[in-house]
Image (cartoon, rainbow, N blue to C red):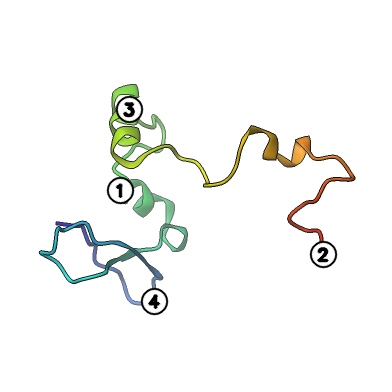
Amino acid sequence: MAKTRPTRKGHATTRRPDTSGGRGQPGYAAEPAHHGLPVHEVVLLLETDAARGLSREEVARRRNQFGSNELPGLNAGASPANWDASSTTPWSMS
């Protein structure tokens, strides 16, 4: 069943795919938007330690479960540091 966490009044929520296998509500489950929470609450939600981070074993487990922490469609050459003045950038109007 997909985890849902209670939100306090006034906190933003985000929606994520419901992975409950049909046992929960169809579609998405509400969860607090991490960017709208205090740091200590995000640390608790992500089940990590702000000072030590994750162990190598936990990183490997989460990478296997959730995939790499990458934005889709980006590659090594897509860094703004590698763009030249003649290239098209996301800020280009033409």
Instruction: Please tell me in which quadrant of the rendered image residue 74 appears.
Output: top right
Can you give x and y, in whole percent of width and height, for residue 16 in the image? 33, 61
Q: Nearer the viewer, mark 4 or mark 2?
A: 2
Kindly state the secondary structure of the residue where label 1 is placed: helix
Q: Nearer the viewer, mark 2 or mark 3?
A: 2
Can you give x and y, in whole percent of width and height, for residue 15 in the image? 35, 66
Q: Could you tell which of marks 1 and 2 lies nearer the N-terminus?
A: 1
Residue 44 is tagged as: 1
Q: Amino acid at mark 2?
A: Met
- Residues marked 1 and 2 touching at CB (< 8 Å): no
Residue 22 lies left or right of residue 89; in this view the side is left
Distance of label 2 from label 3 (alpha carbons): 41 Å
Q: Quick one: label 2, few (<14), some, or many (20+) residues within 10 Å?
A: few
The residue that disc 4 covers is: 10
Q: Amino acid at mark 3?
A: Ala
Q: Amino acid at mark 1?
A: Leu
- Residues marked 4 and 3 touching at CB (< 8 Å): no
Q: Where the N terminus falls, by quadrant?
A: bottom left
Residue at the image position 45 percent from the left and 63 percent from the top: 36
Distance of label 4 from label 1 (alpha carbons): 19 Å
Q: Where the C terminus falls, by quadrant?
A: bottom right
The residue that disc 2 covers is: 93
Residue at the image position 52 percent from the left and 47 percent from the top: 72
- Residues marked 4 and 2 touching at CB (< 8 Å): no
Q: Residue furthest left?
A: 23
